[in-house]
Amino acid sequence: MTLKIAYFQPMTLAIDHVPPVEFSKIYALAENLHQHPELNDNNNNPFISIRGGQQIQVYPNQLGIDVGWLITWLESICKGYMEIVSQQSGTTELKLCRPKIVSAWTIRQFEGDYQEMHSHPAGHLSGNIYISAPEFSDNRLSSDGQIAFKLPHVKDVSKFIMNDVWKYDPTPGTVILFPSHLPHTVYPWKGVGHRTVLAFDAILVPKDQ
């Protein structure tokens, strides 16, 4: 006997590799921005989640930087995520919408820095592109530097709910996408180097808008 599996209301988190051309341009953009500590939003905004490190607004920006190529690519991977969810759920409502990037920023953090548990209320779909990862110390914990998502249910084996947290190691050259409402945190670590990401939020708008 072969069982067929059906998923209802799945929580979809997606991972992919960033194409080399786009990654090279994103890497260069982040490296250029992080050479300017005067652009650090962390000093002026008490509402951002990072504790330590540097956060710089990429889009929209007041620096005169053209990031149209980045927004076009980000919206294309958001469309791919929406197609996966449509296929999994068997519904067609998302075909009436398109993703629109409303914000993108880059974060660089060092040993001991972290991000508090937070969500992204300004978006519907969010993502992280991992640009660099630290070299961890030999006595690292398994959670060091990881991003951890709190899933919207409590683990309960008797109800066949097997996980309530999903964790991911920062892997340069990868991108993860997730629903913006999903709470997540980034753990501190011991080691050298830095963790650099480009994060973004997208909203869903009608296709004809």
Image: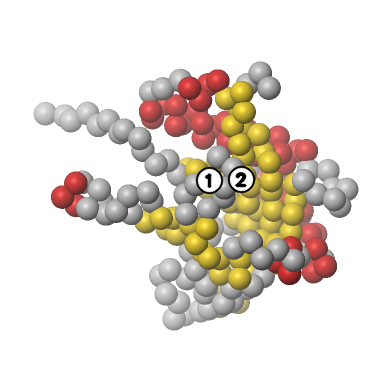
Quadrant holding the C terminus: top right
Q: Which residue is at a point 55% across and 20% down the rendered structure image? A: 96
Q: In the image, what residue type sits under mark 2? A: Ala
Residue 85, by quadrant, is top left
Disc 1/disc 2 C-alpha distance (Å): 8 Å
Residue placed under numbered mark 1 in the picture: 180
Q: Which mark's residue is nearer the viewer, 1 or 2?
A: 2
Query: Could one spot residue 29 in this view of the protein?
Result: yes
Query: Could one spot residue 108 in this view of the protein?
Result: no
Label number found at residue 149: none
* Closest to the observer, 203 or 65: 203
Task: Decide: is 18 above or below 76.
Answer: below
Q: Which residue is at a point 18% across and 30% down the rendered structure image? A: 3
Q: Position of residue 84 (x, y in %)?
A: 46, 31
Q: Which residue is at a point 78% across and 38% down the rendered structure image? A: 68
Q: Position of residue 144 (x, y in %)?
A: 47, 71
Q: Secondary structure at mark 2?
A: loop
Q: Secondary structure at mark 1?
A: loop
Q: Single out the residue that lies furthest toward the bottom.
A: 139
Task: Decide: is 84 above or below 183.
Answer: above
Disc with the residue nearer the chain's start (1 vs 2): 2
Determine crowd level at label 2: few under 14, some 14-19, many 20+ residues with C-alpha closer than 10 A: some
The reply, left or right, for residue 80 in relation to residue 64 is left
Quadrant holding the N terminus: top left
Q: In the image, what residue type sits under mark 1? A: Ser
Q: Which residue is at a point 44% across and 27% down the rendered structure image? A: 86
Q: Single out the residue that lies furthest toward the left.
A: 1
Q: Position of residue 102 (x, y in %)?
A: 68, 41
> Do the numbered discs 1 and 2 sit on residues whose CB atoms are within 8 Å?
yes
Residue placed under numbered mark 2 in the picture: 122
